[in-house]
Image (tube, helix red, strand yellow):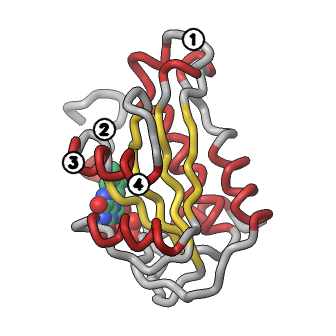
Amino acid sequence: MEDILELIFKRRSIRIYDRKKLDKETITKLMQAAMAAPSGSNSRPWEFVVVTDEEALDKMRSKLKYGNYNAPAAVVVCGNIAIAQNESATRYWVQDCSAATQNLLLAAAGLGLGTCWVASYPKEDVMAMLRGILEIPEEVFPLNVIFVGYPAEEKAPRTQYDESRVHWEKYTN
Ligand SMILES: Cc1cc2nc3c(=O)[nH]c(=O)nc-3n(C[C@H](O)[C@H](O)[C@H](O)COP(=O)(O)O)c2cc1C
């Protein structure tokens, strides 16, 4: 395992991918990482639609204004209050599913994969498009589309540390 900070700095949005496919075992590891995330009262309101079918991917790419990326797979992270363990999800499903997403992104970086988070919720048109292509029911909210695959572009690891954003003890400091 790499140093956790190195891994965090290494994760960058990758928008150009190799055509090499991902195996099911690798995708399952990403799902395990996602579902290890914290959630309000451990409500776990998440579901994931893994898309590797080229036709479906093409349809999604052609409709995503900021997501026409050639990755061999995409994971649509969804919030579903009805399957959550408790009511906490009503308030916190976005945060819960975002935490799961970040786990997925970091696990992918650790496995040498690239990812890019493409926005869906709260864009009604994008959610409707994803629901249509992937047969996601109305009560399930597609939060994002995470493209994933082997990177074909290099991006330098980095932090965007800015000390002026850190207030020690009191905001006015
Ligand atoms: C909520 C959210 C929505 C995003 N939506 C898009 C998107 O629609 N298309 C895209 O190419 N990148 C998208 N990104 C990726 C950001 O552009 C990217 O994280 C940011 O520029 C910082 O670059 P880095 O990921 O390489 O650190 C999104 C990221 C987040 C967290």
Image x and y of residue 120, in percent: 32, 49
* Residues at marks 1 and 4, CA–CA distance in whole angstroms: 29 Å
| Residue depth check, mark 2 versus mark 1: number of the one nearer the observer | 1
Specify whether tag 1 is near ligand 1 (CB below 8 Å).
Answer: no
Image x and y of residue 78, in percent: 48, 40
Quadrant field for ligand 1 = bottom left
Image x and y of residue 16, in percent: 43, 84
What residue type is disc 1 on?
A: Asn
| Residue depth check, mark 2 versus mark 3: number of the one nearer the observer | 3
Residue at left 44%, top 34%? 137
The tag on residue 167 is: 2
Q: Is residue 35 visible?
A: yes
| Residue depth check, mark 1 versus mark 4: number of the one nearer the observer | 4
CA neighbours of label 3 inside 10 A, class few (<14), some (14 to 19), many (20+): few
Specify whether tag 4 is near ligand 1 (CB below 8 Å).
Answer: no
Q: Earlier in the sequence, mark 2 or mark 1?
A: 1
Residue at numbered disc 4: 133
* Residue 148 against residue 163 in the figure, above or below: below
| Residue depth check, mark 2 versus mark 4: number of the one nearer the observer | 4
